[in-house]
Amino acid sequence: MIKNTALTDVHVALGAKMVPFAGFNMPVQYSGINDEHETVRNGVGVFDVSHMGEFILKGDRAMDLVQKISSNDASKLYDGKVQYAYIPNETGGIVDDFLVYRIDEKTYFLVVNASNIQKDWDWIAKYNTYGVTMKNISDETSLFAIQGPKAAEALASLTDIDLATMEYYTFKKGTFAGVDNVLVSATGYTGAGGFEVYVANEHAKAVWDAIFEAGADYGIKPIGLGARDTLRLEMGFCLYGNDIDDTTSPLEAGLGWVTKFTKDFVNAEGLKKQKEAGLKHKLIGFELMDRGIARHGYGIVDANGNPIGRVTSGTQSPTLKKSIGLGYVAIDHAKEGSDVYIEIRNNRVKAVVVKPPFVK
């Protein structure tokens, strides 16, 4: 059964190309990926990402539960602060990557990937030996990501929240488009700046319409998941299911910066041992020197054709007008400036290792 979001009919009416994604019927593009990409990089665009999952953890020991299942250190959070982290599994891989919002010292709001909602819920519940009340509000929550350099200006008239001064990875609650107690955050998955607006499904259509009315003078457009992918890839952001999954090492994926060994969490010892033993592979960024697009699963080889890794994400960058990608390679080929070769059909296409973000 494919699920719809509260605004599926709106996207169809707007002429969106709809595709099944993570169990949901989602808009992949409207006017075209390149046009939508440029809109977000230079102006303002709106993604309906209501397929994402949202959980509320509440109780005296809510932070203890978050600390147990999260790689990052939730004790560093304060009310109104957001943290990026991953949920480690017991075998060295990643259950999911997610966001932790601290509402107050006893209440945490978690945002997880759509494809992992049930898996994450079951995992967190398994470790909930702290008497924490868990609530899954995914099915009743809509989420809009309004992204681009003109986002704050375009939305200013809709809210009493001062968007222009909101710091990256913080959130506030306030009135938005006439709806009270709306959560607005600034986390972003595009590198273009902007905000996320969480509203109950019953208000989704009114809020969506208000956003487009307020943003009309700024050239606001609806944006699909196709441009979301090209935008996040230009920033070198991981996509769960492509670049990280249950079998990939978070340390090899470059997530050591959100792996805090100063506290106890699931499989902390295993990851510590892996770090001490030295990593065998590394997730790299690369740019193709010749024509071709590297796709998920393509092989990466050395100059002699020996296999050294695989591509996890690849696209033609609309901003750079060149082909870019992410992939895992053996650690001795991971140095910036190294030459690697991507196996595209029956050709070996030369690429150079670069440090993301691709678009500075």
Image (cartoon, rainbow, N blue to C red):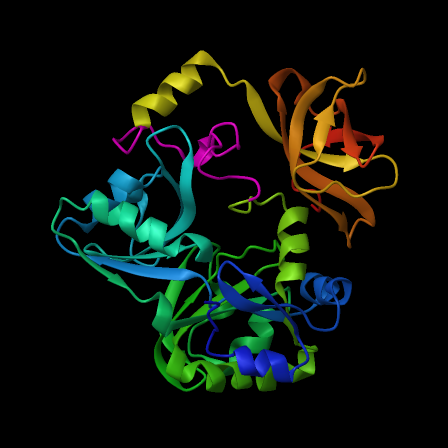
* Left or right, 263 with reference to 278: left
Dividing the picture into quarters, in which one does residue 133 lie?
bottom left
Quarter placement of the N terminus:
bottom left
Q: Is residue 79 above or below residue 306?
A: below
Residue 248 among magenta residues? yes
- Say which of 81 and 350 sits in front: 350
Q: Is residue 211 visible?
A: no
Where 277 falls versus 40 (above or below)?
above
Residue 331 location in percent, x, y? 61, 19
| Residue with the most extreme top position | 277
Q: Count the marks: how many?
A: 0
Task: Tell me if I can see residue 283 in this picture.
Answer: yes
Residue displayed at 60% across by 56% down: 190
**Quadrant in which the C terminus appears:** top right
Please check the rendered image and state whether residue 18 is part of the magenta-colored stretch, yes or no: no
- Tell which of 17 and 225 is nearer to you: 17
**Does 210 sit left or right of 191 as displayed?**
left
Q: What residue span does the magenta drawing correspond to?
A: 242-267
Residue 291: % across, % down = 88, 41
Residue closest to the far front: 1
The percent coordinates of residue 303 (x first, y second) are 81, 18
Give the side of residue 65 with respect to residue 209, left or right: left
**Does residue 120 appear left or right of residue 186 in this picture?**
left
Q: Position of residue 327 (x, y in %)?
A: 64, 34
Quarter of the image for residue 306 reads top right
The prevailing secondary structure element of the residues shown in magenta is loop
What residue is drawn where x is 29% and y is 45%? 123
Residue at left offset 19%, top offset 50%: 62
In this rendering, the answer to whether 347 lies above or below 272 is: below
